[in-house]
Amino acid sequence: MPEEPKPDPIIGEEAEAERIAEARRIAENDRAVEAEMRRRTRRAFMVGGVAALGGFGAWEWIRTRRQDLNEPWPLRRVLDTNEEIARDYFSRRRLAREYPLSEAPKELRINERIGMEDELDPADWKLIVSNADRDDSDDGNNTLTMDDIRKLPHAEHVTELKCIEGWSQKVHWGGARFADFAAVYAPQKGWGYVGMETPDAGYYVGLDLDSAMQPQTLLCYEMNGEPLPEPHGAPLRLVIPTKYGIKNLKRIGKIFYSQERPRDYWAELGYDWYAGL
Amino acid sequence: MFQYGGCMKQIEAKHPLAVRWTHWINFPILFGMIYTGLMIYWASDTYRIGWGSFTLFHFFPDWVYSLFGLSHKLSMGMAWHFFLAWIFAINGFLYVAYTALSGEWRYLVPDRNSFREATQVMLHDLGIRKEPPPQGRFNGAQKIAYTGIVLMGLGSLVTGLAIYKVVQFNWLVALLGGYRAARVEHFVLTMAYLMFFLVHISQVVRAGWNNFRAMVTGYEIKTEEAHAGRTQA
């Protein structure tokens, strides 16, 4: 509060009165300004408070929604929408960067053995191919051996395997392009998905056909120019550089085409189904 | 301008509505981006400051993860991160569009005096320099900080997109120095936000209530000298 001005006996009374009036006016102004500011502050903080509550409510609402594949459904919808946008933008012509052979280390980290808990006798291994346009069997399940895969043109590349956890590592892969495989065992017309499983169906992935047909996608049976080691998925694994490592299924036992998104091991645990790079 | 006749205190418009809304929306969204980003980073927390086998600081010690509940939440972190990223990007775009079109950018973009001013601000704040530096709506240090943080936001979007769709944006990844480099850059920017936040908060506290209130209400109270003509009359 400004002090009430006292008369100054030295200057004239008229000037003195004016000085006091001016000081009063200023004090009055200050009070009015403060009051007006308090009013605006109250209003602004109330609007802000309501907005903050709204934001908190939105968070709480999303968090508590029904789970869809281990995510609240609004978040699952966002993941799926992001997928649609990514698939619109995707082009088979865009390639993952390839590196010279000399840059490929000899060792590759072994992260998981899901779906490979049982020992596999390589002599017993066969590949079931279902729902293909071509059917060499009676029951719609083509049965292939490694010789059938080796007959396909050989391809290799050094690319960086990217784990969804965040680490990445260059690897020298060799095998048959999935696109070449799909030229022989084509999907039925208009079908957009392919699924793959380990022989015990303990691990399974779903892929959009567009990504699978990208030329760097390999049915892989070689690493560093040698037969694929057992922990890395011998005799045949998937290498798909346009996807995170979680989609690069080891020890393929079954390949099937589908009209709808095939189930996916990690998507069921809350991850993005598409997982595309 | 709101004013009752006199010329001592007066209410003056400082921050436009659009700037205040985008600022305050950004606050929880950026917090969420950092929080969910750390949930993702936890799954492969390999960064450290050190030389050879000597580690000065590992990002992060276990207590950080347990204190903030960041462990074993990779899928949850990703789902939120790729949702909030949209809001972060749209809100940031609206802020930049508004400041560009309204002319507000003139208060915010540093000019050739800003860097000299910023040095004076720093010396003043550290108590080395007595006289306060020139303070318009924003001083030189503020201009640099507020423009810098927008560029950092853009940097996070660009490096984030590069990591997110590394094959589809392989040209961008190449510009950023590769996948691993882009991931490091994304992380460094995140740490820079935390540093920014510390300085920003301490400066807001120092500047006081009138300044903070202006970011909420849009107005500040200014105290002006009485007009020279009148006092002399």
Image: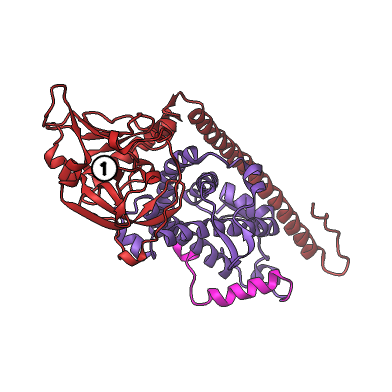
Chain colours: A red, B purple
- Residue B5 can be seen in this image: no
Q: What stretch of residues is rendered in magenta?
A: B102-128
SS of the residue under disc 1: helix
Q: Most prominent secondary structure in the magenta stretch?
A: helix
**Residue at the image position 49 percent from the left and 63 percent from the top:** B147
Residue A115 drawn at (x, y percent) = 39, 34
Question: x and y percent of residue A220 in the render?
Answer: 27, 47
Is residue A197 shown to the viewer in this render?
Answer: yes
- Residue at horizontal 31 percent and vertical 54 percent from the top: A226
Q: Give the residue drawn at x 58%, y 51%.
A: B215
Quadrant for the N terminus of chain B in the image = bottom right
> Is residue A91 left or right of B67 when viewed as pictured?
left
User: To which quarter of the image does residue B178 belong?
Assistant: bottom left
Q: On the rendered image, what quadrant is the C terminus of chain B found in?
A: bottom right
Residue B39 on the magenta segment:
no
Label 1 environment density (alpha carbons within 10 Å; few <14, some 14–19, many ≥20): some
The amino acid at mark 1 is: Arg
Relative to B43, B103 lies left or right: left
Return the residue at label 1. Answer: A87
Residue B204 occupies quadrant: bottom right
Is residue A38 toward the left or the right of residue B183 in the image? Answer: right
